[in-house]
Image (cartoon, rainbow, N blue to C red):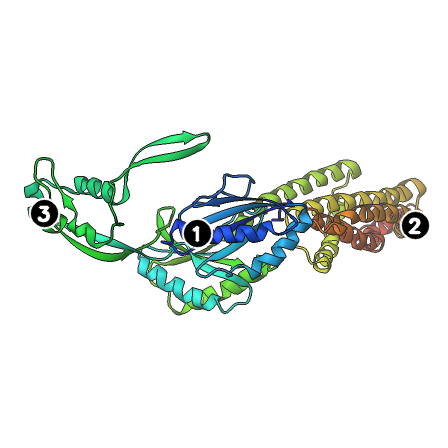
Amino acid sequence: MPIAERNQFAVEIYLPNGSSLEQTEVIAQDLEKLLRKEKTVVSVTSFIGTGSPRFQTAYAPKVGGPNFAQFIVNTTSNEDTELLLDKYSTEYAYHYPNAFVKFKQLEYESVDADIDVRISGENIADLKKVADTLTTKLKKLNEPIRIYTNYEEPLPGIKITLDPVESNRLGVNEGTLALGLASRFGGTPITNIWENDYSLPVVLKSKWENKDPVAEDVSNEYVAGLLSPSVPLRQIADVSANWTEGQINRRNGVRTLSVFVDLKRGERSGLVQPKVEEIVNAVTAKSLPKGVSISYGGVKESDGETMPKLIKALSISIVIIFFILVFHFKKISLATLVLASTSLSIFGAAIGLKVMNVDFSITAVLGIVSLIGIIVRNGIIMYDYTEELRHKHGKTVFEASLEAGKRRMRPIFLTSAAASMGVIPMIISKSPLWCPMGTVISFGTIFSMIFILTLLPLAYWLIYKHEDKNISKDETEQL
């Protein structure tokens, strides 16, 4: 999918899980000052601890948190956006300790990362083992700028196991205990108030005087049942420290750990994806735990969902063109020959994409549809005159083919040249949206013109030369 040509880009700041909002704010403010010093930056809108609202179709809002900040940067022009991204993307990615800064150019591909390797299964330990091995191998590649997973870092926690005898005697259950500890240590949500379009939660929590709570305070916290006196939590429960997963993700109800690969600016996911799949196959071939499966997301999945629809639309357009040709020529064989000549454009289009170093995108597919129409028109120009020479002027197949090739060279050349030159502005603009389309039409038209003027008359003669023999035979028999 092409990138969006906008004088705007996004910046995402990620700190380790568990980082405070104050730490995130310090880094965000420092980076904001750097960006504002750039003369080509018009404005910087910052969101600290939360993500921005949706402002572009394919750029989904990010889930915020104390360890996350986001900027929306507006520049003076599209070209300045490119220059700023070239300057900052790699240099400032790891500029701040324990933080990763992602400079995101807006595009029409709605994916979290360029490459996404999904490891699915029920055992989290098996998933993390495969992910760790895979991450170590992927870090040897030169193209990635960041490799991470969606399970994030483990978080410290406190495990509370109620003593069934003591807790029942005092009338303390898990529900009342959770409510009491939540209001004391974290806060209990009561309601929400709205400030314009923003929701602000109202939380009920206890006030700690002269200090912040620590882990030891949990076991010393007094809890009470509905009718029982307050007692320390350690009297009715076993309190111990433990580590818990920072985040557990599921896809279709199955635990899925994704290994995300963000590529350096200028790297193409289509070229890196086969390298990643080769590493994944090598890792899974040696040892893949039972019940664990591998799938891919990212750009590959997005293209896999989009391209079949485009191919279907392209097939429908080809069928419609075929029926139009049959209606025009009144011959299925001639209509098939003209339609088959459209394959001559693929060679030129492929060379054009290679020479201009552009990706085969959606607009390139639209360019192929336009190119097919141009080639079919040239074929009609060629074969209409050939049929006229044969049936109205009594020419043989060989003579008609040769004469049509000579006489129709000029109009076919002029129309092809006009079509190929007309899209030059698209190519010169280097637009990621229109350059692939212009490249396919321009190079495909030039190369197909050469093939049409040489191969189409030859193909017509090879297919219909037997008709001259039949006519000669009939004339001989009549004599």
Please tell me how crowded label 2 is: few (under 14), some (14-19), or many (20+) other residues with Cα within 10 Å. Answer: some
The reply to whether residue 334 is in sight is: no
Q: Left or right of 205: which side holds 135?
A: right
| Of the pair 142 and 120, the residue shown nearer to us | 142
Amino acid identity at mark 2: Glu
Please tell me how crowded label 3 is: few (under 14), some (14-19), or many (20+) other residues with Cα within 10 Å. Answer: few
Circle 3: element type: helix
| Numbered mark located on residue 403 in the image | 2
- For the residues labelled 2 and 3, the Cα–Cα distance comes to 101 Å
For the residues bearing labels 2 and 3, Cβ distance under 8 angstroms: no
Please tell me how crowded label 1 is: few (under 14), some (14-19), or many (20+) other residues with Cα within 10 Å. Answer: many
Q: In front of the other: label 3 or label 1?
A: 1
Image position of 348 with respect to 194: above or below: below
Amino acid identity at mark 3: Pro
- For the residues labelled 1 and 2, the Cα–Cα distance comes to 77 Å
Q: Find residue 303 and report its horizontal and vertical position in percent.
A: 56, 50
Q: In front of the other: label 2 or label 3?
A: 3
| Of the pair 331 and 407, the residue shown nearer to us | 407
| Of the pair 211 and 104, the residue shown nearer to us | 211
Q: Left or right of 102: which side holds 385?
A: right
Q: Earlier in the sequence, mark 1 or mark 2?
A: 1
Q: Earlier in the sequence, mark 3 or mark 1?
A: 1
User: For mark 3, what is the residue?
Assistant: 164
Q: Earlier in the sequence, mark 2 or mark 3?
A: 3
For the residues bearing labels 1 and 2, Cβ distance under 8 angstroms: no
User: For mark 1, what is the residue?
Assistant: 24
Circle 1: element type: helix
Amino acid identity at mark 1: Thr
The reply to whether residue 33 is in sight is: yes
- Residue at image point 77% right, 54% down: 443
